[in-house]
Each structure stands twice: as structure tokens, then as C-alpha cells.
Amino acid sequence: MSSARPKEYLFDHLVIMGRDRLDELGALFQGEGFHLTPLAHHNLGSSNRLIMLDSSYLELLGWEKGKQVQRAEIANQAIDLDALVFRTTDAQACYEQLKASGFAVNPVQDLSREGEFMGNTVLVEFKTVRFAEQPIPGLRIYFCEHLTPEYVWQKLWLTHANAVDSLKQINIASSDIQKTAASFMKLLNLDINHCVESKDSTRIILPNIELCIQIQNTSEGSYLVSALLQKGQADPVDFIIDQHFLTHF
């Protein structure tokens, strides 16, 4: 058993499902001034392109057109904001903590894809912790440990023509704000100081992002509504990704 016990998780990345339309989805973001990484392929059979930001990133995820879907957990996902991924520095310790907290968690999984670093072909490696049963109904959530972060946050991918550099806030709809917020607090091992409540919303404050849970009458559980990006920490919201935006390709 690992001796490390995660105390605080950063937000790692937001998955945006493109299914077999990754080319079109990538073109949509490029048209808005984002600089995307080249298409890459995972050992599990999926493909992606990334939009790198200061301490997190957007992952456009799917599979090549005309090929059969090999990852069962994404096969039926719609084109939309798809998953919240939190960063751990010790995937095994994360697994043990989640299991001890009563979550239905799967063993640590190895994930990799090809990449390029300083003109050389490299293997970008991760360890992920996924759930047998999602901890918050309606949301897809998992944890990621970067084994080769220098291959991911490369300087050449961090500058965008639109000057956007950070992911500020993710809005989540829920019919039961208190229950959803409590689940996030337990999931991320947070204390009450990370939670800010108001009449119609609750904000979960992480070191590099806010999760804003908003009241919404729905029988579908919680779901992702929008992601707010900005050009600097002092700037207002400069770019919004939501279902309306994702219908334009």
C-alpha cells in the first residue's frame, strides 16, 4: 500500500467528446484561434487532440472515422462536454483513498499515446483511476497521473492566437446542489473551506479552477453545462464552450 495520501487535487483536463468527427471539431476550435496538438492515438484505441492551457487542458476525444470504437466507456457518449478529470501525483494512493472512502473504483490503468518532443518521437504515459460506478450520477469523472508531463505541457502548444490561456470555471447542473457538492467534497478530499454556497449555486474552489454547481430541475442527474475560459487571471470570461457552441460544425 502506498504511504502517500493525496491532500488536494488539481483539475487536470476537460474532455470534449468528438466521436468520429475529431477533424471537424478540431477545425471549429482552430477557427476560434486555438492552437491544437497533432492527432494522437492511445494504446486503448481512442484518438485525441489537445488545447493546452496554463495548468490544465481541453481534450478533444474520439476515434478515427470509419473505425470501430474500441473503448466501451466512450462508445455511446454524445458530442458534448464529456468528462471531468482530476490530477493526482500518485495514482495508487488515489485509488486506495477512493476505495477507503467507499467509492466503486477500478484498479489503476496504464494509458499512453505517441507524441513528439524536441524533434523526437516519444511515448506520453499516464496512469488513470476510473470508476466501476460513477460517483455522481450523470457525470463522467476520473483521475490521472502524468508520468511524462514535460511531453504534455510543451511551450510550443501554450500560445493561442486568441490569447486564451486558462480554464476558469466549469458549470454543472444538478437537481440537488447540496448532494452533488457533498459528493465532490468527499471525492476530492476537501474541507468546508473549499465550498462557497449561495441561494442557487455552490462553488467548489480548487487551486486552479472553480466548479460551479447550479440548480436545475432534471431527472437525468447532474450534467456539464459550460466551460468558461479567460485570457488572464484578472480578466473576465473571454470564451464559453457549451452545447450551443458545439453544434456549429
Image (cartoon, rainbow, N blue to C red):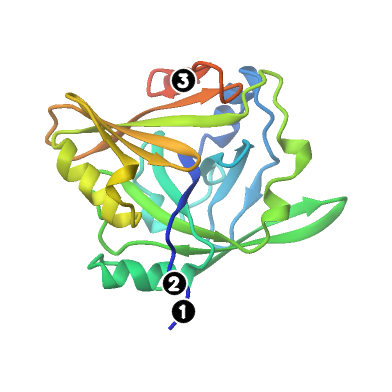
Q: Label 2 neighbourhood size at 10 Å, few (<14), some (14-19), many (20+)?
A: some
Question: Is residue 137 among the parts visible in the rendering?
Answer: no
Tell me, for residue 3, which label it has, or none. Answer: 1
Badge 1 or badge 3: first in the primary sequence: 1
Looking at the image, residue 44 lies above or below residue 181: below
Coordinates of residue 45 in the picture (x, y in percent): 54, 58
Badge 2 or badge 3: first in the primary sequence: 2
Rounded to the nearest angstrom, the CA distance separating label 2 from label 3 is 34 Å
Looking at the image, residue 11 lies above or below residue 160: below
Tell me, for residue 93, which label it has, or none. Answer: 2
Secondary element at tag 1: loop
Secondary element at tag 2: helix
Secondary element at tag 3: strand
Question: Which numbered mark, 1 or 3, is in the foreground of this view?
Answer: 1
Asked whether the residues under the numbered discs 1 and 2 touch, taking CB atoms below 8 Å apart as contact, a structural biologist would say yes
Q: Where is residue 107, by image quadrant?
A: bottom left
Give the farthest residue toward the bottom.
1
Q: Which residue has dot 3 on it? A: 240
Which residue is drawn at the image coordinates 42% and 20% (left, top)? 247
Q: Label 1 neighbourhood size at 10 Å, few (<14), some (14-19), many (20+)?
A: few
